[in-house]
Amino acid sequence: MKFALATEQQDFAAELRKVLDAAQAPAATRAWAAGDTAKGTALLRQVAEMGAFGLIVDEQYDGAEATPVDLVVALVELGRAAAPGPVIESAAVIPALLQRLPNTEPARRWLPALAGGALLGTVSFGATQRGIALDADAADLVLVADGGTLAVGRRTAAGPLASIDPARKLFQVEADEAVAEDAQDAIDYAFDLGVLACAALLLGAGRALLDQTTTYAKQRKQFGRAIGEFQAVKQQLADVLIALDLAEPLLYRAALTLDSDDRARDVSAAIVACGDAAHRASRAGLQVHGAIGYTAECDLSLWITKVAALRTAWGTADFHRGRIADALRAAPAAG
Protein backbone atom coordinates (compact mmCIF):
# COMPACT_ATOMS: atom_id res chain seq x y z
CA MET A 1 0.00 0.00 0.00
CA LYS A 2 1.38 3.39 -1.00
CA PHE A 3 0.62 6.39 1.16
CA ALA A 4 1.40 10.00 0.29
CA LEU A 5 0.09 13.32 1.53
CA ALA A 6 -2.40 15.10 -0.71
CA THR A 7 -1.35 18.30 -2.44
CA GLU A 8 -3.67 20.28 -0.14
CA GLN A 9 -1.98 18.81 2.93
CA GLN A 10 1.49 19.59 1.61
CA ASP A 11 0.43 23.16 0.80
CA PHE A 12 -1.06 23.59 4.29
CA ALA A 13 2.19 22.39 5.86
CA ALA A 14 4.21 24.79 3.72
CA GLU A 15 2.01 27.76 4.64
CA LEU A 16 2.11 26.87 8.32
CA ARG A 17 5.89 26.65 8.18
CA LYS A 18 6.07 30.11 6.61
CA VAL A 19 3.91 31.57 9.38
CA LEU A 20 5.98 29.93 12.11
CA ASP A 21 9.24 31.08 10.53
CA ALA A 22 7.96 34.64 10.13
CA ALA A 23 6.75 34.72 13.72
CA GLN A 24 10.20 33.70 14.99
CA ALA A 25 8.98 30.75 17.04
CA PRO A 26 12.35 30.23 18.84
CA ALA A 27 12.15 33.76 20.27
CA ALA A 28 8.60 33.07 21.48
CA THR A 29 9.79 29.83 23.08
CA ARG A 30 12.64 31.62 24.87
CA ALA A 31 10.22 34.24 26.16
CA TRP A 32 7.81 31.52 27.32
CA ALA A 33 10.62 29.86 29.26
CA ALA A 34 11.37 33.21 30.92
CA GLY A 35 7.74 33.58 32.04
CA ASP A 36 6.53 35.91 29.27
CA THR A 37 3.75 34.07 27.46
CA ALA A 38 2.54 37.00 25.34
CA LYS A 39 4.61 36.18 22.25
CA GLY A 40 3.84 32.49 22.45
CA THR A 41 0.11 33.07 22.92
CA ALA A 42 0.05 35.42 19.93
CA LEU A 43 1.88 32.80 17.87
CA LEU A 44 -0.57 30.05 18.83
CA ARG A 45 -3.54 32.27 18.04
CA GLN A 46 -2.06 32.98 14.63
CA VAL A 47 -1.70 29.25 14.06
CA ALA A 48 -5.27 28.71 15.26
CA GLU A 49 -6.54 31.33 12.80
CA MET A 50 -5.08 29.19 10.03
CA GLY A 51 -7.30 26.37 11.28
CA ALA A 52 -4.68 24.17 12.96
CA PHE A 53 -6.46 24.02 16.32
CA GLY A 54 -9.83 23.23 14.81
CA LEU A 55 -8.80 20.46 12.45
CA ILE A 56 -10.51 17.61 14.29
CA VAL A 57 -13.34 19.79 15.65
CA ASP A 58 -16.77 19.22 14.10
CA GLU A 59 -18.24 21.95 11.92
CA GLN A 60 -21.07 22.49 14.41
CA TYR A 61 -18.41 23.75 16.84
CA ASP A 62 -16.73 25.99 14.22
CA GLY A 63 -14.09 23.43 13.31
CA ALA A 64 -12.81 22.04 10.02
CA GLU A 65 -13.95 18.44 10.66
CA ALA A 66 -10.74 17.18 9.06
CA THR A 67 -8.88 13.91 9.64
CA PRO A 68 -6.23 12.83 12.15
CA VAL A 69 -3.76 12.79 9.25
CA ASP A 70 -4.41 16.52 8.73
CA LEU A 71 -3.78 17.07 12.44
CA VAL A 72 -0.50 15.17 12.27
CA VAL A 73 0.61 17.30 9.30
CA ALA A 74 0.07 20.46 11.37
CA LEU A 75 1.72 19.10 14.51
CA VAL A 76 4.84 18.00 12.66
CA GLU A 77 5.32 21.63 11.61
CA LEU A 78 4.71 22.88 15.15
CA GLY A 79 7.33 20.42 16.39
CA ARG A 80 9.72 21.53 13.67
CA ALA A 81 9.32 25.12 14.94
CA ALA A 82 9.61 24.18 18.67
CA ALA A 83 6.41 26.13 19.30
CA PRO A 84 5.68 26.71 23.01
CA GLY A 85 2.53 26.12 25.00
CA PRO A 86 -0.04 23.33 25.43
CA VAL A 87 -0.26 22.53 21.73
CA ILE A 88 -1.04 18.83 22.09
CA GLU A 89 -3.74 19.49 24.64
CA SER A 90 -5.43 22.39 22.82
CA ALA A 91 -5.26 21.07 19.26
CA ALA A 92 -5.74 17.33 19.83
CA VAL A 93 -6.58 15.98 23.27
CA ILE A 94 -9.28 18.31 24.55
CA PRO A 95 -11.19 18.47 21.22
CA ALA A 96 -11.22 14.66 21.04
CA LEU A 97 -12.20 14.36 24.68
CA LEU A 98 -15.07 16.82 24.64
CA GLN A 99 -16.60 15.51 21.42
CA ARG A 100 -16.81 11.97 22.79
CA LEU A 101 -18.54 12.78 26.06
CA PRO A 102 -22.14 11.59 26.49
CA ASN A 103 -23.12 15.19 27.27
CA THR A 104 -22.51 17.72 24.49
CA GLU A 105 -22.76 20.79 26.72
CA PRO A 106 -18.99 20.98 27.48
CA ALA A 107 -18.24 20.77 23.75
CA ARG A 108 -20.65 23.62 23.01
CA ARG A 109 -19.17 25.67 25.83
CA TRP A 110 -15.45 25.34 25.02
CA LEU A 111 -14.78 23.96 21.54
CA PRO A 112 -15.55 27.06 19.41
CA ALA A 113 -13.12 29.12 21.48
CA LEU A 114 -10.47 26.38 21.34
CA ALA A 115 -10.81 26.01 17.58
CA GLY A 116 -10.51 29.76 17.06
CA GLY A 117 -7.54 30.23 19.36
CA ALA A 118 -9.37 32.44 21.85
CA LEU A 119 -8.88 29.78 24.51
CA LEU A 120 -5.91 27.58 25.39
CA GLY A 121 -6.50 24.39 27.31
CA THR A 122 -4.47 21.79 29.16
CA VAL A 123 -5.33 18.43 30.67
CA SER A 124 -3.87 15.95 33.13
CA PHE A 125 -4.43 12.20 33.00
CA GLY A 126 -4.26 10.97 36.57
CA ALA A 127 -3.26 7.42 35.70
CA THR A 128 -0.17 8.26 33.63
CA GLN A 129 0.67 11.88 34.40
CA ARG A 130 0.14 11.82 38.17
CA GLY A 131 -1.96 14.95 38.27
CA ILE A 132 0.58 17.08 36.40
CA ALA A 133 -0.66 19.51 33.74
CA LEU A 134 1.42 21.44 31.22
CA ASP A 135 1.26 25.25 31.32
CA ALA A 136 -1.66 25.32 33.77
CA ASP A 137 -0.69 28.90 34.57
CA ALA A 138 -1.15 30.10 30.99
CA ALA A 139 -4.13 27.91 30.03
CA ASP A 140 -7.66 29.27 30.16
CA LEU A 141 -9.09 25.79 30.72
CA VAL A 142 -7.59 23.06 32.92
CA LEU A 143 -9.15 19.59 32.87
CA VAL A 144 -8.38 16.48 34.92
CA ALA A 145 -9.24 13.03 33.54
CA ASP A 146 -9.02 10.29 36.12
CA GLY A 147 -10.96 7.16 37.03
CA GLY A 148 -13.51 7.60 34.26
CA THR A 149 -14.39 11.13 35.43
CA LEU A 150 -13.59 14.37 33.66
CA ALA A 151 -13.44 17.46 35.85
CA VAL A 152 -12.31 21.05 35.74
CA GLY A 153 -8.95 21.23 37.47
CA ARG A 154 -7.16 23.76 39.62
CA ARG A 155 -3.55 24.25 40.56
CA THR A 156 -2.49 23.06 44.00
CA ALA A 157 0.76 25.06 44.10
CA ALA A 158 1.76 28.45 42.77
CA GLY A 159 5.14 27.50 41.31
CA PRO A 160 5.95 25.07 38.51
CA LEU A 161 7.70 21.73 38.92
CA ALA A 162 11.19 21.23 37.54
CA SER A 163 11.41 20.23 33.86
CA ILE A 164 14.36 19.48 31.63
CA ASP A 165 12.74 21.86 29.12
CA PRO A 166 12.48 25.38 30.60
CA ALA A 167 9.65 26.19 28.17
CA ARG A 168 7.48 23.38 29.60
CA LYS A 169 5.89 24.68 32.81
CA LEU A 170 4.51 21.73 34.76
CA PHE A 171 1.98 22.23 37.55
CA GLN A 172 0.37 19.88 40.03
CA VAL A 173 -3.42 20.06 39.62
CA GLU A 174 -6.41 18.40 41.22
CA ALA A 175 -10.00 17.82 40.20
CA ASP A 176 -12.59 20.38 41.18
CA GLU A 177 -16.01 20.58 39.50
CA ALA A 178 -17.02 17.40 37.65
CA VAL A 179 -17.80 17.80 33.96
CA ALA A 180 -18.73 14.23 33.03
CA GLU A 181 -18.99 10.80 34.63
CA ASP A 182 -18.59 7.43 32.90
CA ALA A 183 -16.22 9.01 30.38
CA GLN A 184 -13.54 6.29 30.33
CA ASP A 185 -13.93 5.53 26.61
CA ALA A 186 -13.53 9.22 25.75
CA ILE A 187 -10.55 9.52 28.10
CA ASP A 188 -8.82 6.47 26.60
CA TYR A 189 -9.31 7.75 23.06
CA ALA A 190 -8.11 11.25 23.93
CA PHE A 191 -5.01 9.87 25.65
CA ASP A 192 -4.08 7.82 22.59
CA LEU A 193 -4.58 10.88 20.39
CA GLY A 194 -2.25 12.75 22.75
CA VAL A 195 0.35 10.03 22.24
CA LEU A 196 -0.04 10.37 18.47
CA ALA A 197 0.26 14.17 18.68
CA CYS A 198 3.40 13.88 20.81
CA ALA A 199 4.91 11.52 18.23
CA ALA A 200 4.19 14.11 15.52
CA LEU A 201 5.92 16.86 17.52
CA LEU A 202 8.92 14.59 18.05
CA LEU A 203 9.20 13.82 14.34
CA GLY A 204 9.04 17.52 13.50
CA ALA A 205 11.66 18.33 16.14
CA GLY A 206 13.89 15.58 14.77
CA ARG A 207 13.61 17.01 11.26
CA ALA A 208 14.52 20.47 12.56
CA LEU A 209 17.56 19.11 14.40
CA LEU A 210 18.75 17.32 11.28
CA ASP A 211 18.29 20.43 9.13
CA GLN A 212 20.20 22.65 11.56
CA THR A 213 23.00 20.13 12.01
CA THR A 214 23.38 19.60 8.27
CA THR A 215 23.56 23.35 7.68
CA TYR A 216 26.17 23.74 10.41
CA ALA A 217 28.23 20.83 9.03
CA LYS A 218 28.39 22.58 5.66
CA GLN A 219 29.60 25.84 7.22
CA ARG A 220 31.96 24.76 10.02
CA LYS A 221 35.50 24.15 8.81
CA GLN A 222 38.39 22.16 10.23
CA PHE A 223 41.71 21.44 8.56
CA GLY A 224 40.59 23.67 5.69
CA ARG A 225 37.50 21.59 4.90
CA ALA A 226 33.83 21.75 5.87
CA ILE A 227 33.27 19.10 8.55
CA GLY A 228 30.34 17.80 6.54
CA GLU A 229 32.84 16.40 4.06
CA PHE A 230 34.22 13.95 6.62
CA GLN A 231 32.84 10.44 6.37
CA ALA A 232 32.22 10.14 10.12
CA VAL A 233 29.92 13.18 10.06
CA LYS A 234 28.16 12.07 6.87
CA GLN A 235 27.45 8.65 8.42
CA GLN A 236 25.91 10.14 11.54
CA LEU A 237 23.60 12.41 9.57
CA ALA A 238 22.65 9.59 7.21
CA ASP A 239 21.71 7.41 10.20
CA VAL A 240 19.48 10.20 11.54
CA LEU A 241 17.77 10.64 8.19
CA ILE A 242 17.11 6.90 7.91
CA ALA A 243 15.67 6.76 11.44
CA LEU A 244 13.33 9.69 10.76
CA ASP A 245 12.25 8.31 7.40
CA LEU A 246 11.48 4.91 8.96
CA ALA A 247 9.50 6.49 11.81
CA GLU A 248 7.32 8.62 9.55
CA PRO A 249 5.23 5.76 8.07
CA LEU A 250 4.46 4.47 11.57
CA LEU A 251 3.22 7.93 12.52
CA TYR A 252 0.84 8.19 9.58
CA ARG A 253 -0.32 4.59 9.96
CA ALA A 254 -1.29 5.39 13.54
CA ALA A 255 -3.26 8.40 12.31
CA LEU A 256 -5.08 6.23 9.77
CA THR A 257 -5.94 3.46 12.28
CA LEU A 258 -6.99 5.75 15.12
CA ASP A 259 -10.58 4.50 15.00
CA SER A 260 -9.64 0.81 14.76
CA ASP A 261 -8.89 -1.89 17.32
CA ASP A 262 -5.17 -1.38 16.57
CA ARG A 263 -5.19 2.17 17.95
CA ALA A 264 -3.20 1.63 21.15
CA ARG A 265 -0.61 -0.58 19.45
CA ASP A 266 -0.08 1.78 16.53
CA VAL A 267 0.18 5.05 18.48
CA SER A 268 2.63 3.40 20.87
CA ALA A 269 4.72 2.13 17.96
CA ALA A 270 4.68 5.62 16.46
CA ILE A 271 5.87 7.41 19.59
CA VAL A 272 8.61 4.86 20.27
CA ALA A 273 9.96 5.17 16.72
CA CYS A 274 9.62 8.96 16.54
CA GLY A 275 11.09 9.39 20.01
CA ASP A 276 14.10 7.22 19.22
CA ALA A 277 14.67 8.99 15.90
CA ALA A 278 14.43 12.45 17.47
CA HIS A 279 16.81 11.38 20.24
CA ARG A 280 19.29 10.17 17.63
CA ALA A 281 18.98 13.55 15.91
CA SER A 282 19.68 15.29 19.24
CA ARG A 283 22.81 13.25 19.87
CA ALA A 284 24.13 13.80 16.36
CA GLY A 285 23.39 17.51 16.63
CA LEU A 286 25.36 17.76 19.86
CA GLN A 287 28.30 15.82 18.50
CA VAL A 288 28.52 17.87 15.32
CA HIS A 289 28.04 21.25 17.02
CA GLY A 290 30.26 20.44 19.96
CA ALA A 291 29.82 22.03 23.38
CA ILE A 292 28.12 25.13 21.96
CA GLY A 293 25.13 22.95 21.01
CA TYR A 294 23.77 22.56 24.53
CA THR A 295 24.30 26.13 25.71
CA ALA A 296 21.27 28.33 26.25
CA GLU A 297 22.58 30.81 23.67
CA CYS A 298 22.39 28.23 20.86
CA ASP A 299 18.96 27.67 19.32
CA LEU A 300 19.75 23.97 18.94
CA SER A 301 19.29 23.58 22.70
CA LEU A 302 15.60 24.52 22.38
CA TRP A 303 14.93 21.39 20.34
CA ILE A 304 17.28 19.16 22.34
CA THR A 305 15.55 19.90 25.64
CA LYS A 306 12.10 19.65 24.05
CA VAL A 307 12.87 16.22 22.62
CA ALA A 308 14.20 15.04 25.99
CA ALA A 309 11.00 16.15 27.71
CA LEU A 310 8.52 14.92 25.09
CA ARG A 311 9.97 11.40 24.99
CA THR A 312 8.39 10.67 28.40
CA ALA A 313 5.61 13.26 28.56
CA TRP A 314 2.96 10.81 27.32
CA GLY A 315 4.34 7.60 28.75
CA THR A 316 7.84 6.15 28.84
CA ALA A 317 9.27 3.98 26.09
CA ASP A 318 8.93 0.96 28.40
CA PHE A 319 5.24 1.74 28.91
CA HIS A 320 4.60 1.92 25.18
CA ARG A 321 6.69 -1.13 24.35
CA GLY A 322 4.61 -2.98 26.94
CA ARG A 323 1.41 -1.93 25.17
CA ILE A 324 2.81 -3.11 21.84
CA ALA A 325 3.79 -6.44 23.35
CA ASP A 326 0.35 -6.87 24.94
CA ALA A 327 -1.35 -6.16 21.61
CA LEU A 328 0.83 -8.63 19.75
CA ARG A 329 0.21 -11.36 22.33
CA ALA A 330 -3.53 -10.76 22.12
CA ALA A 331 -3.60 -10.86 18.31
CA PRO A 332 -4.98 -14.09 16.78
CA ALA A 333 -2.41 -16.39 15.22
CA ALA A 334 -2.05 -16.15 11.44
CA GLY A 335 -3.33 -19.03 9.32
Image (cartoon, rainbow, N blue to C red):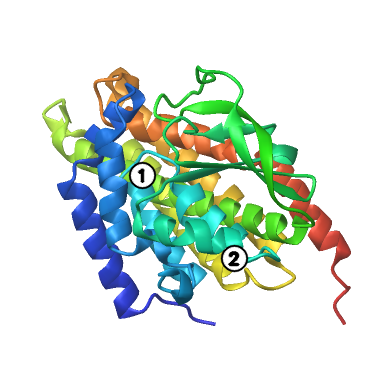
Residue at far left of view: 224
Give above or below for 105 relative to 136: below
Q: Amino acid at mark 2?
A: Gln
Point 67% across, 63% down: residue = 101
* Residue wearing tag 1: 237
Res 212 → quadrant: top left
* Residue wearing tag 2: 99
Point 61% across, 22% down: residue = 156
Q: CA distance from mark 1 to mark 2?
A: 42 Å
Q: Quadrant of the C terminus?
A: bottom right
Q: Nearer the viewer, residue 238 or 54?
A: 54
| Residue 299 % position (x, y) | 26, 30
Q: Is residue 255 left or right of residue 115?
A: right
Point 35% across, 37% down: residue = 232
Q: Is residue 13 left or right of residue 260?
A: left
Crowdedness near tag 2: few (<14), some (14–19) or many (≥20) residues, C-alpha within 10 Å: many
